Image (cartoon, rainbow, N blue to C red):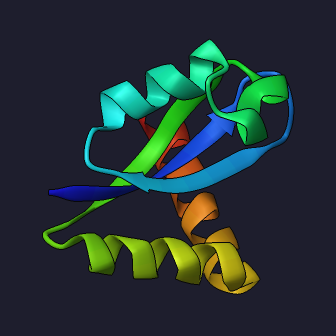
Amino acid sequence: MFYVYVLRSLVGDKHYIGYTNDINSRLRKHNDGDVRSTRKFRPWMLLGFEVYEKRNEARWREHELKNHETKRNLLIKNLEESIKEIA
């Protein structure tokens, strides 16, 4: 299984979208500073994820979200609202 995930920085108004086959390990790498692009906005929390069977499906969705502002913003808004409903 592959995952497209959305992270939210706990120190700034930043989000990060990526894909992986191991969410826990990847989140740890982001928070340990092993990912250059997210290092200065640590710590990160997992906002949500989508599951895909094939790597190319996850890569395509990641590309779609990173390159289409409307789709990205809608997903982030929906995830943020679902977090507020739980809290």
Image quadrant assignment for residue 8: top right
Question: Of 54 and 75, which appears nearest the observer?
Answer: 54
**Going 63% across and 61% down the picture, which residue do you hit?**
77
| Residue located farthest toward the top when viewing the structure as drawn | 32
Above or below, 52 relative to 19 = below
Q: How many marks?
A: 0
Which quadrant would the N terminus be assigned to in this image?
Answer: bottom left
In percent of width and height, residue 26 lies at 43, 33
Q: Is residue 82 visible?
A: yes
Above or below, 43 relative to 2 = above
**Going 31% across and 56% down the picture, which residue do you hit?**
3
Image quadrant assignment for residue 61: bottom left
In percent of width and height, residue 72 lies at 64, 72
Image quadrant assignment for residue 59: bottom left
Question: Of 52 and 29, which appears nearest the observer?
Answer: 29
Above or below, 3 relative to 56 = above
Q: Is residue 74 left or right of residue 22?
A: right
In percent of width and height, residue 11 lies at 82, 22
**Going 52% across and 55% down the picture, which residue do you hit?**
18
Q: Is residue 81 visible?
A: no
